[in-house]
């Protein structure tokens, strides 16, 4: 089976490419390298000993994307490509809506033109908005608190409409919680451009001395220590969730929806403590005002994925922090170290 991975040079995409190749799938990677690095793909080849085609293409470029399908017999698509930072989306919403939604519409139109009806979509737990209770199941009401989450929810609705219009489609919506960690080799991990938007890469850059201290946004939430609680999942567990989706749901028409999380919530300060333990480094922090669009608590009930995909997250918080530190300490400047 030949799988197109959009956004395949990114953090989750590159880890998923490793797992796909290790499972014997052929891949083609499409990425505009806007928030990723082509060197990650060299590491994918090194870790797997396998080669694949790479297209430096933006999904907003309809003709260039169409050419990828013309030149390759694609069976399925895993769609990661998109802008992904909650805080940034509040500042530049127009860019987020245009990039994430228009790019996906182009992709879907081209897939249909080439009779490719299998897609796994990288959605997000942000589609649950501010949940009334936790843990969160897939049948919770959907709403959003920021433009990034709104683009994910809009794309989910588009995909549902696409299936209603043509029942050939097999669509899997994977609602991620908070991916962290790195490949066990220490040669591949999260490499954000500029100042990180997500918690763990920020913590790790403080630990390695690149940043002075961690900004903790809010300590007055109704949580165990007042800081935000999230469900952190190892990126390799997340990647394996995509493999299970391809194995179990490809060619099964319908819209299949799964939470990918551990079912455990950790606060910001608990994450700081876990990372200090893993790295042996102090992580100084300062408490600041809440960020717009953030919520108090968010963690998954992952039972549906366990029952239907035979998928379970097996890597705990200590392993996530150890793997992140192995990557960051040996690659303080990411892939350009």
Image (cartoon, rainbow, N blue to C red):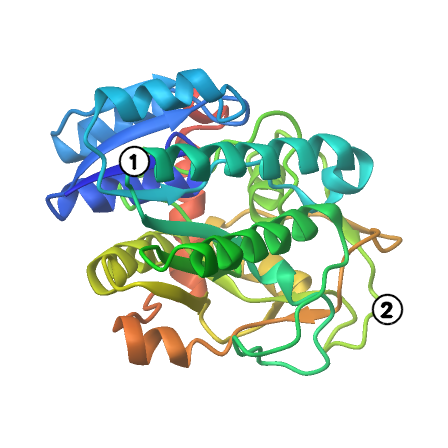
Left or right: residue 126 versus residue 88 is left
Q: Which quadrant does the N terminus fall into?
A: top left
Q: In front: 110, or 261?
A: 110
Q: In front: 184, or 170?
A: 170
Residue at 37% x, 26% y is 30
Left or right: residue 37 versus residue 102 is left
Which residue is denoted by mark 2 in the rendering?
220
The image position of residue 16, as x and y in percent, is: 31, 44
Q: Which quadrant does the C terminus fall into?
A: top left
The image position of residue 282, as x and y in percent, is: 62, 48
**Compared with residue 211, is residue 151 higher up or lower down, i.e. above or below?**
below
Which residue is denoted by mark 1 in the rendering?
4
Query: Could you classify mark 1 by the number of other residues whose Cα lies within 10 Å: few (under 14), some (14-19), or many (20 or more)?
Result: many
Residue at 83% x, 59% y is 218
Residue at 55% x, 56% y is 156
Q: CA distance from mark 2 to mark 1?
A: 44 Å
Q: In front: 140, or 22?
A: 140
Residue 335, by quadrant, is: top left
For label 2, the SS is loop
The image position of residue 22, as x and y in percent, is: 14, 44
Q: In front: 125, or 224?
A: 125
């Amino acid at each position: 089976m030949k799988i197109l991975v959009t956004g395949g040079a990114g953090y989750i995409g590159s880890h998923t490419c490793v797992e796909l190749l290790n499972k014997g799938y052929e891949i083609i990677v499409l990425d505009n390298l806007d928030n990723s690095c082509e060197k990650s793909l060299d590491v994918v080849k090194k870790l797997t000993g396998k080669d694949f085609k790479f297209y430096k293409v933006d999904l907003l470029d309809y003709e260039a994307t169409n050419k990828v399908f013309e030149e390759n017999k694609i069976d399925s698509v895993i769609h990661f490509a998109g802008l992904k930072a909650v805080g940034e989306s509040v500042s530049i919403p127009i860019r987020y809506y245009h990039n994430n939604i228009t790019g996906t519409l182009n992709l879907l139109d081209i897939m249909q033109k080439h009779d490719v009806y299998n897609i796994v979509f990288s959605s997000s737990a942000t589609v649950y908005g501010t949940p009334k209770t936790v843990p969160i199941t897939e049948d919770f009401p959907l709403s959003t608190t920021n433009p990034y989450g709104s683009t994910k929810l809009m794309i989910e609705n588009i995909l549902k409409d696409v299936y209603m219009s043509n029942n050939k489609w097999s669509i899997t919506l994977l609602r991620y919680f908070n991916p962290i960690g790195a490949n066990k080799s220490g040669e591949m991990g999260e490499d954000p451009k500029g100042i990180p938007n997500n918690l763990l890469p920020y913590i790790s850059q403080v630990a390695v001395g690149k940043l002075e201290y961690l900004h903790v946004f809010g300590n007055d939430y109704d949580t165990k220590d007042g800081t935000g609680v999230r469900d952190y999942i190892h990126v390799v567990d997340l990647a394996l969730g995509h493999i299970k989706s391809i194995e179990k749901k490809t060619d099964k028409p319908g819209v299949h929806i799964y939470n990918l999380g551990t079912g455990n919530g950790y606060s910001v300060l608990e994450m700081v403590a876990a990372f200090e333990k893993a790295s042996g480094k102090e992580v100084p922090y300062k408490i600041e005002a809440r960020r717009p669009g953030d919520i108090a608590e968010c963690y998954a009930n992952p039972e549906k994925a366990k029952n239907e995909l035979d998928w379970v997250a097996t890597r705990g918080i200590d392993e996530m922090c150890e793997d992140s530190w192995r990557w960051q300490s040996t690659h303080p400047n990411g892939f350009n170290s």
